[in-house]
Amino acid sequence: MKTLDRLDVTREGERVSICASARSFCIRRCASMVGALAFVGEGRWSADDLSAALAARDRTACAPVAPPEGLYLMQVDY
């Protein structure tokens, strides 16, 4: 089980930034989170849809992962 310590979403004009912080990440975890948040932001999903996807604990219930373009590793702390 992984724990997300912090998730900040900010918007400046057309640019949306999502900053996630955790002790470790599973493969494609950030891309999956960004894909789900994009669905909510675009109106494709409601907050209830996002909650249902999380509760399902099943990858097939998730939104498509965000493409790698625009996703950046900003910092690693040891």
Image: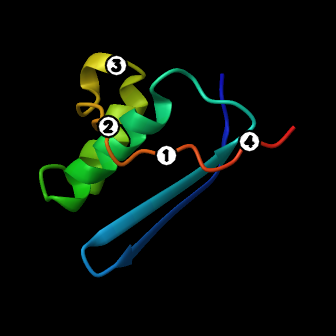
Q: Say which of 69 and 9 sits in front.
A: 69
Mark closer to the observer (1, 2): 1
Of pointers 4 and 3, the one earlier in the residue sequence: 3
Left or right: 71 as drawn, with respect to 75:
left
Label 1 neighbour load within 10 Å: few <14, some 14-19, many 20+: few
Tell me if label 4 and label 3 are in contact, CB under 8 Å.
no
Q: Position of residue 29 (x, y in %)?
A: 48, 30
Q: Position of residue 77 (x, y in %)?
A: 81, 43
Three-letter amino acid code of the residue under disc 4? Val
The disc placed on residue 59 is 3
Q: Which residue is mark 2?
A: 52
Label 4 neighbour load within 10 Å: few <14, some 14-19, many 20+: few
Q: Which residue is mark 1?
A: 72
Of pointers 1 and 2, the one earlier in the residue sequence: 2
Mark closer to the observer (2, 4): 4
Three-letter amino acid code of the residue under disc 1? Tyr
Secondary element under disc 3, as helix, strand or loop, is: helix
Of pointers 2 and 4, the one earlier in the residue sequence: 2
Residue 55 position (above or below residue 6)? above
Secondary element under disc 2, as helix, strand or loop, is: helix
Q: Residue furthest left?
A: 44
Secondary element under disc 4, as helix, strand or loop, is: loop
CA separation in Å, label 1 and label 3:
23 Å
Q: Which picture quadrant has residue 35?
A: top left
Secondary element under disc 1, as helix, strand or loop, is: loop
Residue 56 position (above or below residue 78)? above
What is the tally of numbered marks visible in this picture?
4
Q: Say which of 14 and 29 sits in front.
A: 14
Mark closer to the observer (4, 3): 4
Residue 67 position (above or below residue 40)? above
